[in-house]
Each structure stands twice: as structure tokens, then as C-alpha cells.
Image: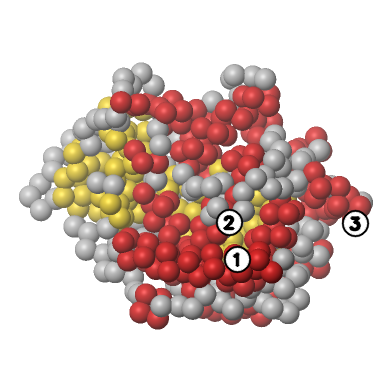
Amino acid sequence: MNARPNKDFFASAVAADRSPARVVLTNGLILADPSVCNVEPHYATVIEGDALTAVNAQEIQPGPGDHVLDCSGCLIAPGLVNAHTHAAMSLLRGVADDVALDRWLHEYIFPAEARFAGEYFVYLGTKLSAVEMALSGTTAFADGYFHMEHAARAAEEVGLRIVAAQGILDVPAPDAAQPGAWRRRVDAFLADCPRSPLVKPALFCHSPYLCSPETLKEAYTLAAENGVRLFCHVAETAWEATEILKRFSATPATHLHSLGLLGERFTAVHAVHLSEDEIDLLARSQASVVHCPECNMKLASGAAPVAELLRRGALVGLGSDGAASNNNLDLFEEMRTASLLAKLVNSDPTALDARAALKMATLDGARAIGLGSECGSLAEGKSADLIVVDFNQPHLTPVYDPASHLVFSAKGSDVRDVFVRGRQVVANRRVTTVDVDALLAEVRLLSAEIDRELRAKRART
Ligand SMILES: [Zn+2]
């Protein structure tokens, strides 16, 4: 049984963008370049169409017809980049907590997905997550799941950028019932994925333990032929490291390297249980890494050696992973946790400082998922993907170091305005692009159905 779609809701279209010709942001503070993280007094930043045509320019005066956004008491920053999630899983948030990854996957998540994760589930759950992410300052996300053309459509309707990575497993999946049917599914996805400047298609192999060497190699070849990225969970748990060693006489990252995967279009998600050699391998390779600290902590998977990966020059972005194993998509929390966890496990209060965490959540996250030339920093000619964070709050006053505030004190709910490709997706803490009340009503209907089924299943066992 797949979730039954509300046909009218499922068929909703991308609303027309009625953005004014020119938006001029004035006053406040600005952090334009996360590679240096300097915060400066802000004069004027101009959005024309989808691009930034001036960033912190002193000479700009707003004219008649301009939409002027006063940012007094606020900080303007690049939009946050969630470099790894499974957005539709917000519909399974809270279904199972406080269990280990293997039980969580095999006893709860895989059976629930097999039963419910049809096209409508993916569309609705991704739309819900895109709204949650927009409201907490995320402007781009990399998503790995099933029926990904519908995830792409949902993100586009909300107005966020998505790197939509179609899931690949050797075991039956919600959109490829027969083992090995993933190839047909990938072909259909690549043909049907919406053509939009907000959408980049990609592929997502679940893991080296659920994808054979042949599948991994074929997926990488397909990614190269189609000019798209390939994502994969790698070395998430100690069990995986032992299992891959048993099956292939190699550690997980070494195994993938031997298959030729650690190239510039490859992103390794988690990278928790790495040997010294694997840390070197990932740092030297063109591949990127995504750190998901809250999910790793919640499932007790371990702590990725992020400070060491960064010290050796690896490119590392930050991800929430799915809402069912986090249990929210707030990248502000993820930045704070990444920094605190690195300090704890290294017994070093200088490890992964606020600026390093900010860079991972913006520019390096964008680079890690193939969007570095478009977003992640604020510069003339780059896409206008930015957030305005309201510092007029008790927990953000006074301000001595704004970058520290962003990582250690701010929350997603402090984001006042969000622009993606020049379009204002959030205005004064409200989503402008979709009807959020109608969306929540649809989610409640579907979750009631899921809840009934899960209770009935538990009663039978
Ligand atoms: Zn994941």
C-alpha cells in the first residue's frame, strides 16, 4: 500500500514569482565570505533578477520602485546548505527513537518505507521538510531518497535549491520492487526530473553494504556519463567497517577507492569510522565528505574525525541527515553540535571553531554537493541565496562576535528573511511560496493513516 494522494494537492504547481525588479537590503551587519568570516557594518546589497549585483556597496541609494528591506539589528549571511538529508522522512519523524541503526533501519524504517513511501509520500514529506528548512535558513539541500523527481518538484514549489539524488540499492526499494531494478528507475528519474535552475539531478548509492561493487561502479559510470554527482553513506558504523572488511578485505573508503569512486563527483556521507589511511585518502582525493553530527550522536554511530579531516585538507560539508534520525532539520543546531562534539572528542576547546563550522554549513557545503559556483557566499554575479538573521533577541544581545552568535547562540527560528535565486521565499518568518496551513493539514491526514497501520502491525506482532 502506498499513501493515497490527494489529487488536487499532488497536482499543485510552482507559483509564479512576483519578485520586484530590484531588492535593496540596507543597514545591519553582513558576513559575505565564509572562507574568511569577516563581519562588517552593512551599507547596501542589491538583488536584481536571480543575482546579486552589489554586495555591501556604500554608494547605492534605493530608488523609487525598489523594494527596500531594512536589516537594522540583523545580520545578512549566505543561505545555509544542508549537504545531506532524506527530506521525505520528516513524515516518519518520531516513529522510532532510542534504538541502534541496524534495528532502526530493519525493524522500523525499511518496513514503513516499503509500505508507505510512494510518490505522494515523497512529494508531501519533501515539501514539509523544504518548508522547515526554508524557515530555518537553509536555501539549498542535497537529498537522497526514492521517487526523486517528486522530491525535486516539491523543493521547486517551495523555492529551495535541491540536489535530488535518486536512491540505488541492490535490495528491493519502494520505487524498484525487484532486486536489481534500480537501473530502470534511474533512467526514468533522469528522464523525468524537472528541468529547473533550482534542481540538479544526482544519484545516491545507499552504502557499500547494500550496493555491490558492480552496482557502485555502474552507478559511478552513469553519474559520469550524465554529468551528475554520486552520494553514498560511507563508514557510518563500526559494524559497517567490520562487515566491509569481512566481505572485501578492505575498509569502506579503501574499498570505494579500489572501485575508482573517490573522484571529484563523489560525496562520502558520514565518514565516521575511518582509519588513518582513509582520512588521508579522503583528504587527498577529489571526493567530498558530509558530516552529520546529530544523527551520528542520536544513533550512537560515533564521532567523525572532522577536525582531522579538515586539518589534512578534506572538503567537508554539514548535513542533518533525515528528520527521522535527528529529529529536526535546523542547520544552526547542526553547526553548534559539530563544533561542540569536535571539542569534546578531541579534548580541545579550540577544535572546529565557529568560523570552521560556518564555512562547512555554507561555502564548503555548497562545494561538497556541486553548487559552489552558484551559492555558499555573497559576491557580485553570484546567485542571490541569502538569509537575514534577526539579532534583536534576548539570546543574541549584546553582540561582541556575530560569527560566534550564529553558531553558538542563534536558532533557525531567528531567521527573518530568506532569498533563493533572488526570490523571497521567507518574509518576516513566513513562507511566501506555498500554503503552509494546507500542507500541514495534508500531512496530518497522511500521518493518521501511517499511525493506524503501524499500531495495527504492532498489535499483530
Ligand atoms: Zn543518510
Q: Is mark 3 on a helix, strand or loop?
A: helix
Camera-nearest label, 3 or 2: 2
Residue 93 x/y as whole percent: 53, 55
Compared to residue 371, the image places residue 459 above or below, namely: below
Farthest left residue in view: 64
Q: Residue furthest front?
A: 459
Q: Is residue 100 left or right of residue 1?
A: right
The amino acid type of the residue labelled 2 equals Val
Seen at 75% across and 38% down, the residue is 279
Q: In this view, does 368 lie to the left or right of 48?
A: right
The amino acid marked with disc number 3 is: Arg
Q: How far apart are marks 3 and 1 (CA)?
A: 35 Å
Q: How far apart are marks 2 and 1 (CA)?
A: 9 Å
Alpha-carbon neighbours of circle 3 within 10 Å: few (<14), some, or many (≥20)? few
Which residue was labeled with disc 2?
95
**Which residue occupies 21% across, 63% down?**
18
**Residue 232 visible, this orientation:** yes
- Mark positioned earlier in the residue sequence (2 or 1): 2
Q: In this view, does 81 lie to the left or right of 113?
A: left
> Residue 203, percent across and down?
62, 65
In the image, which is nearer the foreground, mark 3 or mark 1? 1
Tell me if 217 is positioned left or right of 334 in this view: right
Please name the residue that numbered disc 1 is placed on: 454
> Which of marks 1 and 3 precedes in the sequence?
3
Task: Tell me the kind of residue under disc 1.
Answer: Leu
Q: Where is residue 32 in the image (x, y as percent from the top left)?
A: 37, 36
Residue on which the image places disc 3? 247
Asked whether disc 2 touches disc 1, contact meaning CB atoms under 8 Å apart, the reply is yes
Task: Indicate which disc, 3 or 2, sits on the residue closer to the N terminus.
Answer: 2
